[in-house]
Image (tube, grey):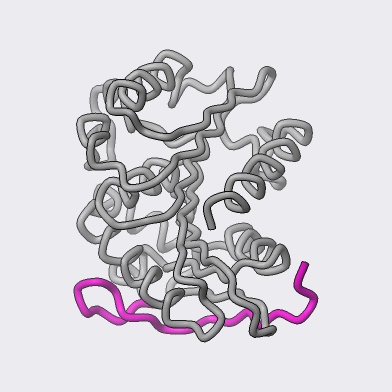
C-alpha cells in the first residue's frame, strides 16, 4: 500500500502527437512499480473513474486515465462530453489506440516505472481494453464486461464500432475477463465465443462470471452495483496485476 500519493490533471502526448487531457494518480515513493492505463466507460472521464485510478495508486501502481473525449469536447463536463461523443458515433478505434499509447508512454517514462503496463476498462472501456491489447504491446489487460468484442451489434446501434474477436491472434498479453451472468451485452454466449477464440489461439486468459450480477456491477453509484461480485472482482484484478505487472 502507498499512503503518499499525487493525483492531478495533466496533459499527455497521444500516440499520434496530439496533446490530450489525462488524470494521473501515482505513488510518491521511488520503488519500481507497474502502471495501469484506466480506460473510462461511455459516461466519460468522470469522478468514479478518477477514484479507480487513485485506488490503483494506493495499491502500489501508477495509473493514468486518458480523457478519450478531449478532442470531441475539450473542457466540457463529463455528461456533455459523453453526449457529444455518442452523437458522433463514439470514439474511433484508431483514436483510442493512440490515446492508450500515450498513456503507456507516460507511465513508462516515470522514474519509478518498472517498465510494465496493463490496461483496464469497464463497459465500452472493456472492449477498448481488449482493443488496446490486440493493437499495442502490453503486459496485462482487464476486460470488465466489455460489450461487442464478440457477438452481433443490434440493428440501429448508435456507436460506430465493430466486433474484435477476429483480432484475437494479435493479443499481446494475458487477459482477465470479469462478467455478469445476467448481462445482455456481453451475454454469456458472447463471453463463451471469446473464450473459444482465446483457446483456439493459445492465449493466456482468466474469466470469471458472477451470478446475480448484470452490467456495471462495479459501479458503486448505480443500482446495478453488486457488492459481493465487485469485491471479488477487485481481488481478482489485484492478483492478476500482481502476477503480470
**Residue 79 seen in this snapshot:** no
Give the quadrant of residue 153. top left
Looking at the rendered image, the quarter that the N terminus falls into is bottom right
Q: In the image, is residue 148 above or below residue 116? A: above
Q: Give the image location of residue 120, x and y in percent.
A: 49, 51
* Looking at the image, residue 243 lies above or below residue 229: below
Position of 13 relative to 81 (above/below)? below
Reply yes or no: does residue 212 show up in magenta: no
**Residue drawn where x is 59% and y is 82% of the image:** 8
Q: Nearer the viewer, residue 208 or 69?
A: 208
**Horizontally, is 107 left or right of 112 in the view?**
left
The image shows residue 203 at horizontal and vertical percentages of: 36, 33
Q: Which residues are magenta?
A: 1-20
Coordinates of residue 173 in the picture (x, y in percent)? 38, 46
Residue drawn at (48%, 84%), measured in percent from left and top? Answer: 10
Observer able to see residue 102 = yes
Residue 107 position within the rendered picture, expressed as x and y whole percent measured from the top left: 46, 74
Residue 155 lies left or right of residue 223; in this view the side is left
Horizontal relation, residue 98 to residue 183: left or right: left
The residue depicted at 56 percent of the width and 81 percent of the height is: 112
What is the number of callouts on the image? Answer: 0
Residue drawn at (40%, 33%) of the image = 147
Q: Is residue 234 left or right of residue 176?
A: right
Q: Which is nearer the eye, 49 or 244? A: 244
Q: Nearer the viewer, residue 235 or 144?
A: 235
Identify the image quadrant of the C terminus. Answer: bottom right
Whether residue 6 is in magenta: the answer is: yes
Amino acid at each position: 500500500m502507498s499512503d503518499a500519493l499525487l493525483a492531478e490533471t495533466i496533459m499527455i502526448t497521444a500516440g499520434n502527437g496530439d496533446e490530450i487531457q489525462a488524470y494521473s494518480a501515482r505513488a510518491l515513493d521511488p520503488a519500481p512499480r507497474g502502471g495501469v492505463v484506466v480506460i473510462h466507460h461511455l459516461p466519460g472521464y468522470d469522478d468514479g473513474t478518477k477514484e479507480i485510478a487513485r485506488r490503483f495508486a494506493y495499491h502500489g501502481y501508477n495509473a493514468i486515465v486518458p480523457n478519450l473525449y478531449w478532442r470531441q469536447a475539450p473542457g466540457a463536463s463529463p455528461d456533455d462530453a459523453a453526449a457529444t461523443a455518442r452523437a458522433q458515433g463514439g470514439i474511433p478505434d484508431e483514436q483510442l489506440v493512440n490515446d492508450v499509447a500515450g498513456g503507456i508512454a507516460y507511465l513508462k517514462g516515470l522514474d519509478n516505472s518498472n517498465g510494465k503496463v496493463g490496461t483496464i476498462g469497464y463497459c465500452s472501456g472493456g472492449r477498448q481494453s481488449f482493443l488496446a491489447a490486440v493493437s499495442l504491446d502490453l503486459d496485462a489487460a482487464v476486460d470488465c464486461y466489455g460489450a461487442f468484442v464478440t457477438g452481433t451489434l443490434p440493428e440501429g446501434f448508435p456507436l460506430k464500432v465493430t466486433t474484435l474477436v477476429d483480432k484475437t491472434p494479435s493479443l499481446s498479453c494475458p487477459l482477465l475477463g470479469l462478467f455478469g451472468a445476467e448481462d445482455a451485452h456481453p451475454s454469456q454466449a458472447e463471453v463463451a465465443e471469446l473464450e473459444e477464440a482465446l483457446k483456439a489461439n493459445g492465449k493466456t486468459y482468466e474469466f470469471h462470471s458472477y451470478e446475480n450480477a448484470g452490467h456495471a456491477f462495479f459501479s458503486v453509484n448505480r443500482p446495478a452495483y453488486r457488492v459481493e461480485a465487485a469485491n471479488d472482482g477487485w481481488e481478482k484484478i489485484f492478483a492478476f496485476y500482481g502476477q503480470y505487472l
